[in-house]
Image (spheres, helix red, strand yellow):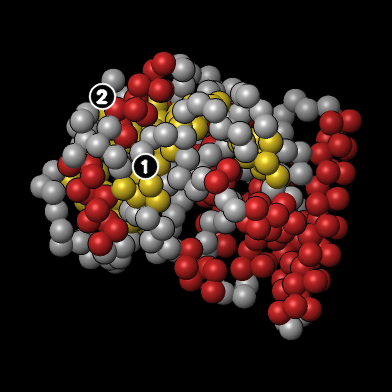
């Protein structure tokens, strides 16, 4: 199957972007097109491999990803961030796996959760209830409280998944468009779309499509932090995490078509436990960091999330379950 590449960028990744373009030029299976979606107001990078096209679009990580891709006619689109580097056979591996496992999308494992040191795994467990699992089927699972778990015993290259990382993913274009991902642009209101990957990829899974993660694609994340760097430095990140996490949980887990009353109650209880646990974590963090803002922003995020789900704009969003099958 033929494919094209779509990259979102601000044009500020410098040498990392050069390495990415060079790695595209070395692919054993060449793309039909390389289209770079750059934010309006940003200059086109000087370096070129001679085959890329630039399209200026509205700024925003999700706005630059959730597009109609009218410039691309290929049945497959490899969606990339501007700070990844591909092995020479990465595209070939991803296309082969997508066909072999009858998938609608396959994402590269670029964050290597299962390779984290024990300290990192403990930190993830304590601060967001993110735990390892040992499934022989799933790469990542999304749980009723909104947190994910990751496969800690990877024994083969490809696993089915309920979510994935966003830096590199190969999609069937018609399935991508059928998900109506523009309905999720509400996340952009936070300035930094915290939780974008879970919101996007879990929608694929929840709507009955096949998603997988490739653990040996050869794609590495160079971690340019062109958008996330400023987010991490801002104390208000505690508010964004709290509010966005609540809304994502409500939209992707709680407020779904076709789930029973009893299942909804279990989902609600799961989130309440998580919220209370994280309240204690943020209280401890506030003491350690000598900043009451940490706890204040967490609580404010939850309350503003509750207000948001009562707003007309949120209530008018189409359900997360689209009902569209491809």
Pointer 2 local density, CA inside 10 Å: few below 14, some 14–19, many at least 20:
some
Q: Give the answer, above or below, for where 159 lies relative to 84.
A: above
Q: Quadrant of the N terminus?
A: top left
Q: Residue 98: give x, y in percent of width and height.
A: 41, 22
Q: Residue at x 83, y 35 (%)?
A: 264
Residue drawn 48% across and 71% down? 230
- Give SS at disc 2: loop
Residue 44 occupies quadrant: bottom left
Position of residue 9 relative to residue 263, above or below, is: below
Q: Residues within 10 Å of mark 1 (few under 14, many from 20)?
A: many
Q: Reading the chain from its start, which is encountered first: label 1 or label 2?
A: 2
Taking the image as shown, residue 55 lies to the left or right of residue 58, namely left
Q: What SS does tag 1 mark?
A: loop
| Viewer-side residue, 9 vs 287 | 287
87 up-or-down from 10: above or below:
above
Residue nearest the viewer, comparing 74 with 178 = 74
Q: Residue at x 80, y 71 (%)?
A: 284
* The label number, if any, that marks residue 219 in the structure image: 1
Which residue bears the numbered disc 2? 2
Q: CA distance from mark 1 to mark 2?
A: 19 Å
């Amino acid at each position: 199957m033929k494919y094209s590449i779509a990259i979102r960028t601000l044009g500020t990744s410098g040498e990392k972007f050069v390495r990415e373009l060079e790695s595209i030029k070395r692919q054993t299976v060449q793309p039909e097109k390389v289209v770079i979606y750059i934010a309006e107001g940003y200059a086109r990078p000087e370096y070129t491999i001679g085959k890329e096209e630039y399209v200026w679009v509205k700024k925003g990580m999700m706005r630059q990803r959730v597009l109609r891709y009218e410039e691309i006619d290929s049945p497959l689109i490899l969606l990339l961030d501007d700070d990844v580097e591909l092995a020479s056979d990465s595209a070939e591996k991803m296309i082969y796996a997508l066909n072999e496992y009858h998938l609608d999308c396959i994402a590269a494992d670029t964050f290597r959760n299962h390779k984290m040191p024990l300290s990192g795994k403990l930190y993830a467990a304590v601060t967001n209830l993110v735990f390892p699992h040992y499934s022989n089927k799933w790469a990542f699972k999304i749980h009723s409280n909104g947190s994910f778990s990751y496969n800690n015993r990877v024994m083969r290259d490809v696993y089915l998944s309920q979510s994935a990382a966003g830096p590199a993913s190969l999609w069937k274009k018609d399935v991508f468009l059928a998900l109506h991902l523009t309905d999720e642009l509400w996340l952009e209101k936070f300035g930094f779309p915290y939780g974008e990957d879970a919101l996007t990829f879990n929608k694929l899974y929840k709507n009955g499509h096949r998603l997988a993660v490739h653990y040996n694609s050869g794609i590495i994340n160079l971690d340019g932090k062109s958008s996330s760097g400023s987010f991490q430095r801002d104390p208000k990140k505690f508010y964004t995490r709290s509010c966005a996490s609540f809304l994502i949980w409500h939209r992707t887990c709680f407020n779904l078509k076709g789930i029973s009353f009893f299942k909804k109650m279990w989902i609600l209880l799961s989130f309440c436990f998580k919220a209370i646990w994280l309240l204690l974590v943020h209280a401890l963090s506030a003491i350690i960091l000598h900043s009451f803002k940490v706890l204040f922003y967490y609580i404010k995020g939850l309350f503003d999330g509750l207000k948001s789900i009562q707003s007309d704009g949120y209530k008018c969003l189409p359900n997360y379950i689209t009902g569209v099958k491809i």
